[in-house]
Amino acid sequence: MKRKYLATPYIIWVIGFTLLPLITIGVSAFTGDDGAFTWDGVLAIAEPINRQALLFSLAIAFGCTMICILLAYPAALFLKSFRFKRKGFTIFLLVLPMWMNFILRILAWQMILSKNGILNFILGRFGAAPLAVSNTWISLMIGMVYDFLPYMILPIFNAISDIDEDLIEAARDLGAGSGAVFCKVIFPLSVPGMLSGIVMVFVPAMTSFVIADILGGGKLQLIGNIIEQEFMKSMNWHLGAGLSISLMILVLIGLAFTMRGDMEERGTALW
Amino acid sequence: MRKRKLCVLGAALAGMLMLGGCGKEEPTEYLTVFNYGEYMDPDVIDRFTEETGIGIKYEEALTPEELYAKYISGAIDYDLVCSADYMIQRLIEEGEAQKVDFASMEYADNIGDRFWEFSQAFDPDNEYALPYFYGTIGILYDTTKVDAPIDSWGVLFDGSYKNDIIMQNSQRDTFMITLKYLGHSLNTSDEGELREAQELLIRQKPDVQAYLVDEARDEVVAGNAAMAVVYSGEAYLGHEYNEDLAYVVPKEGSNVWIDSWIVTKHCKNPEAAAKFLDFLCREDVAEQNFEYIYYSTPNQAVVENMDEELRNDPAITPTEEDLAKCEVCTQTDPEITKLYNELWKELKAD
C-alpha cells in the first residue's frame, strides 16, 4: 500500500497516451460517417484486399521472426562465450546502431540495395551479375531483420546468461554432446527469452508500414500500409480505426496463445 | 574576473534587446496567411511588412489535405489561403472564400490571361482565386538511357523499359496520366473508364521499379531508373543535378495544376488582404519569389524578364502547345474519390 503516489506519473501516462487514444480509436472504429454504431469498420479486415494484405503481413512477420531466431541463437551463444569485459563491449556494439533513427538506417539500406547501389557496385567489381533485390519482398525482409534483430538477441542472450553453468556441466558429465546440451538444456531454459523476443519482433513486423514504403518501393502492401492510407490519404478514419482494432485483437489472440504456457510456468516473462 | 564577464554579457544582451526594440515599429494590423512550407521567400514577407506596416502571421501545411483539415478545424481564423486547384474549388464550393476585386488591383494584370482562363475551371467568373504558381506533370528521363526522345505516355505502358520506370505514389496523379493516355478526360466520373485505367496500371505494375513521391526525381538523377513521372518543378531541379535529364509533357496531354490564393470569409480586413495579393503580383516581388521556388510562374512580367535558358526550359515555362494539351483537375465528387481509393488499393494489392 505504501508509496502509491509513486505510480502517479505512470498512471497519468497510461491514461493520456494509452487509454484515451485507445478509446478514440475504438469510438472511430465502431461508428460510421453518420456517427451511428456499425460493425463495418472492424469487419472490413475480411474483405479480400485487406485479408490479402493481412496474410502477406503475417507471412512477412513470421519469416522475419524465424530468421531473427535463427540468427539470434548463435549470436547469443557466441556472446556468452566471451569474458565479462568483452561481453559488455559486444553488446554495446549490438545496441549502438539503435541510437540512430531507424528511418535513416532503412534509407541507408535503400541506397545499399538499389539498382546502382553499393551492393551491386561491389558485386560488379568482382565480376558478378547485379542482384535485383530492390523494391521486392526480399529487400523488405532484409530491412526488417536488420531493424528488429537486436530485440531478439538481447532477451535470448539474457535468458542464456541466466542458465546455471552447473546445469550445462552436469549434462556434459552425463555424456551429452554439444548438440544435446543445446537441445535438452540451453534451448528449453531460454524459451522465455525467445518468447519475449518474438513479441518484440513479430508485433512490430506485423504492423509496420514505413519499411515497406521505403524498401518495397510502394509496390508491397502490408496491412499497416492500408491503415496508413485510410488515415492519411483516403481520410476514412472509421475504416482505418476499424482495421487497427481488428489487427490489435488478432495480435492479442496470437500472443495469448504464445505466452500461455510461459506465464503458467514462470509467472513473469522477461518483458 | 568572473563577475566582470557576466557584466559585459549582461550589457551586451541589454544592448541587443534595445536595438531590436527600436529597429521598427510594431504593426497594428495583421494578416494570417496559410501556405505550404517553403512556398514563399521569407524575405518577401518582411518586405511587405516594411512597406505597408501590415504584419503577417505565417502558417504552414504540407499537403492540400492537411491544409484543409487544419483550416476546417477552425482553431485559427486564416485570412488568406494558398492551395491546389481542387482544394481551392472545394473551399469555394463550401462558401469559405470571399470575392476579391482583382480589377482594382494595380499589378493583377501581370498574371497572364491564360492562367485566369485555367482558373475558370474552378472559379468560373474569376471572382475568388488568384493564380500563384503552376506546373505540369510529365516524364523526366535520362537521355542516355532511351533509344529515342520520348513523346508519349506509351513508353510507360508498352513494356519497353521494364523495371526502369518510377511512377508517382499518388493515386490522383497516377490515374490522371493513365486516363490521358487512354484518351479520356482526367476528370472523368465514368466508372468504366476508371476501371480501364486501373487494368492498364495493373498490367504495368511488374514493369514499375517503384512508386515514389519525393524520391522519384532522385532515382533518375542517380541513374537507378531511366524515367519517372514527376511535377515540372522537380524536373527543373533534376536537370540542375544531372545534365543528361530531359522533361517532356507527352503528346496525349497531361494535368496542369495551379496553386492559387483565396481570401477567406473570416477575413475582416479585405483591403489589407487585397494589398498583400497585389504585392505578390508586383514584378520584383514575384521575381524574388520565383527565384526562391523555381516553379512555373503565371506572372508574365517575370517570364519576359527571364534568362533565355529558363524561358526556353519546358519545365519552367511550359509551351503554349503543351498547355493546350493539358487539363485542370476539378474532380472533387466524394463518390469518385472513394472509387479512386478502392481502385488504388486493388492496384497495390495485385
Image (tube, helix red, strand yellow):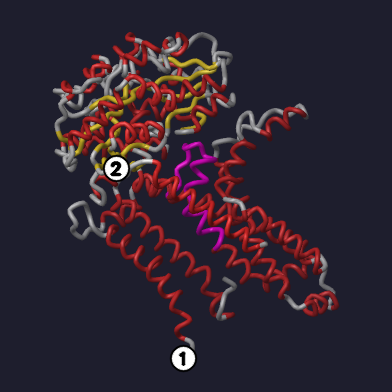
Task: Characterize the local packing of mark 1: few (<14), some (14-19) or many (20 or more) Cα atoms within 10 angstroms.
Answer: few
Question: Badge 2: how crowded within 10 Å, few (<14), some, or many (20+)?
Answer: few
Number of numbered tags placed on the structure image: 2
Given residues B200 and B119, the one toward you in this image is B119
Position of B144 relative to B137 (above/below): above
Element at label 1? loop
Q: Is residue B178 visible?
A: no
Report the mark closest to the observer, 2 or 1: 2
* Stretch of the chain drawn in magenta: A200-223
Which amino acid, mark 2?
A: Pro
Q: Which mark is residue A1?
A: 1
Q: Nearer the viewer, residue B115 or A204?
A: B115
Residue wearing tag 2? B27
Percent across and percent down for residue B261 are 26, 31
- Farthest residue to the bottom: give it: A1
- SS for dot 2: loop
C-alpha separation, residue under disc 2 versus residue under disc 1: 60 Å
| Residue B199 on image: x %, y % | 36, 28
Q: Image quadrant for the N terminus of chain B?
A: bottom right
Chain containing mark 2: B
**Spot occupied by residue B80 in the image (x, y as percentages of width and height):** 25, 37
Who's the residue at 25% across and 26% down the image?
A: B278
The residue shown at (40%, 41%) is B23
Nearer to me, B138 or A72 = B138
Magenta span includes A214: yes
Q: Is residue B154 left or right of residue A141?
A: left
User: Any mark on residue B19, and which?
Assistant: none
- Position of residue B90 measured from the top left corner of the image (x, y, whole percent): 21, 36
